[in-house]
Image: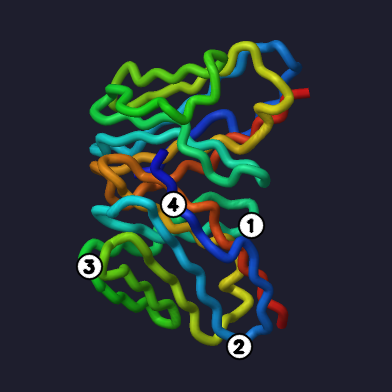
Amino acid sequence: DAGVIQSPRHEVTEMGQEVTLRCKPISGHNSLFWYRQTMMRGLELLIYFNNNVPIDDSGMPEDRFSAKMPNASFSTLKIQPSEPRDSAVYFCASSFRVFEAFFGQGTRLTVV
Amino acid sequence: GQQVMQIPQYQHVQEGEDFTTYCNSSTTLSNIQWYKQRPGGHPVFLIQLVKSGEVKKQKRLTFQFGEAKKNSSLHITATQTTDVGTYFCAGVPGNKLVFGAGTILRVKS
């Protein structure tokens, strides 16, 4: 297995534009997490899916953020419209239940 | 909300010195996990502790889970330059994985 695959690795966009981050979890894992990492706030859990169903989205900062998991092998995190304060590294992680989370390489988002 | 607190935020040690990072939760945890993130990398799983009072070792690393399952520690004996990075604890209160803020370790050679 290639591990958790995230795309793109880097994204630079202008304020106000829509940004879509993609994640392919490890096959067989039934939990998927989206995290955001910044120097100021550390590693924040944005949303957690179990068996493709969003279980906890209390970490999603505001309505500009949305996440979907249409099937067991794909998830997206969308920001619309993007703002400079959204600049961060976004990680997707998957696990079987909540044991040993495997992280993707992350997407470094810069909003200018 | 559910929080996992981790201290210290940052530690700079001389190579060969020991290092410890501590993790505390406001709620009882079903298990606690430790991860390491190298500079520019992504968090990588190190270990999971499940039982009250559990102690596990990985070479120079010793992990402990408190009796009340609300705190944990990671101790590194005789640090090496390869130990640099950020060490995160992650607690499982309920059914989600909540990370501490991490401890950044720098090692002077």
Asked whether the residues under marks 3 and 2 belong to the same chain, the reply is yes
* Rendered-image quadrant of the N terminus of chain A: top left
Sequence-first tag of 4 and 2: 4
Q: Position of residue B46 (x, y in %)?
A: 39, 63
| Image point (44%, 62%), residue name | B23
Q: CA distance from mark 3 to mark 1?
A: 32 Å
Label 4: chain letter: B
Separation (CA) of disc 4 from disc 3? 17 Å
Q: Which residue is mark 2?
A: B16
> In the rendered picture of this protein, how many numbered marks are placed on residues?
4
Q: Amino acid at mark 3?
A: Ser
**Closer mark to the observer between disc 1 and disc 2:** 2
Q: Are marks 3 and 1 in contact (CB under 8 Å)?
A: no
Find numbered disc 1 in the image and state the secondary structure of the residue it sits on.
loop
Name the residue carrying label 4: B4
Residue located 47% across and 67% down the image:
B22
In the picture shown, does residue A104 fall above or below B69?
above
Vertical side of B51 occupied by B17: above or below: below
Q: Nearer the viewer, residue A24 or A67?
A: A67
Secondary structure found at label 2: loop
Count residues near mark 3 (Cα–Cα under 10 Å), then give few for <14, some for 14-19, many for 20+.
Answer: some
Tag 2 or tag 1, which sits nearer the N-term? 2
